[in-house]
Image (tube, helix red, strand yellow):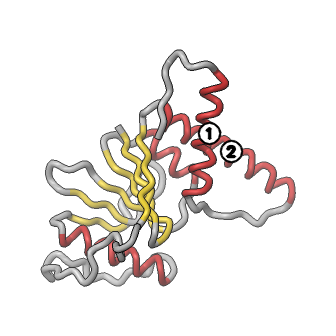
């Protein structure tokens, strides 16, 4: 993602902020609110505020953002049919979310377990919980959100979390990686 020079003119800064907002809007799936007209206008204003603040974190280089898309011949981002030591596997059934969410959560969990990570389901963040946390010695902690996310939760956690990776999995074909510095 682009970054800004301290001496950039305001119109260049504003243009870059708008580019980031557009990218974020097109990249991240958020919860939708079907509310009355006044509430919808308030939600749109608040959404723009949150997107602007996330864009500022990226442009100020406090957070590095990368979009990763799946290109052929890659069939999946995750190792499929991983052989996991039964002692490492979390045997609890995942009841969290709909069918795709639960299936994807289990696939990602198995992927990271097969790479030697310890995986925690629904770890606490500064605000709310992530779907998964993966950690391994000498690696940055990895927090994973699958599907939709609240922009307020994302902004708060990106602003407060340090030295970790916040990975958003909006669908099977795209990942959004935020590296908090």
Furthest-right residue in this view: 37
Relative image position of residue 47 (x, y in whole percent): 67, 48
Between 2 and 78, the one lying in front of the other is 2
Between 37 and 6, the one lying in front of the other is 6
Relative image position of residue 33 (x, y in whole percent): 72, 63
The residue sitting at 17% across, 79% down in the picture is 84
Asked if residue 154 is positioned above or below residue 163 in the image, the reply reads below
Relative image position of residue 88 (x, y in whole percent): 16, 75
Q: Mark 2 sits on what residue? A: 48
Q: Give the total of numbered labels.
A: 2
Furthest-front residue in this view: 73
With 36 as the anchor, is 26 left or right in this view?
Answer: left
What element does badge 1 sit on? Answer: helix
With 26 as the anchor, is 69 left or right in this view?
Answer: left
- Say whether marks 1 and 2 touch (CB < 8 Å): yes
The residue sitting at 78% across, 49% down in the picture is 42
> What crowding class fits label 2: few (fewer than 14 Cα within 10 Å), some (14-19), or many (20 or more)?
some
The residue sitting at 85% across, 53% down in the picture is 38
Asked if residue 156 is positioned above or below residue 133 in the image, the reply reads above
Asked if residue 13 is positioned above or below residue 75 in the image, the reply reads above
Between 25 and 116, the one lying in front of the other is 25
Q: Mark 1 sits on what residue? A: 52
Cα distance between the residues tagged 1 and 2? 6 Å
The residue sitting at 23% across, 57% down in the picture is 135
> What crowding class fits label 1: few (fewer than 14 Cα within 10 Å), some (14-19), or many (20 or more)?
many
What element does badge 2 sit on? Answer: helix
Q: State which quadrant residue 181 falls in.
A: top left
């Amino acid at each position: 993602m682009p970054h800004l020079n301290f001496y950039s003119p305001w119109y260049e800064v504003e243009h870059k902020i708008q580019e980031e907002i557009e990218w974020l809007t097109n990249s991240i799936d958020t919860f939708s609110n079907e509310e009355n007209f006044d509430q919808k206008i308030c939600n749109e204003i608040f959404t723009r505020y949150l997107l602007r603040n996330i864009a500022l974190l990226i442009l100020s280089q406090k957070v590095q953002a990368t979009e990763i898309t799946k290109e052929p011949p890659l069939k999946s981002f995750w190792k499929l049919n991983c052989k996991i030591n039964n002692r490492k596997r979390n045997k609890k059934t995942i009841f969290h979310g709909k069918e795709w969410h639960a299936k994807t959560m289990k696939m990602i969990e198995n992927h990271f377990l097969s790479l030697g990570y310890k995986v925690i389901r629904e770890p606490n963040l500064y605000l709310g919980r992530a779907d998964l946390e993966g950690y391994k010695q000498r690696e940055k902690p990895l927090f994973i959100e699958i599907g939709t996310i609240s922009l307020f939760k994302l902004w708060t956690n990106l602003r407060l979390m340090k030295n970790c990776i916040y990975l958003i999995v909006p669908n099977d074909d795209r990942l959004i990686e935020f590296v908090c510095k």
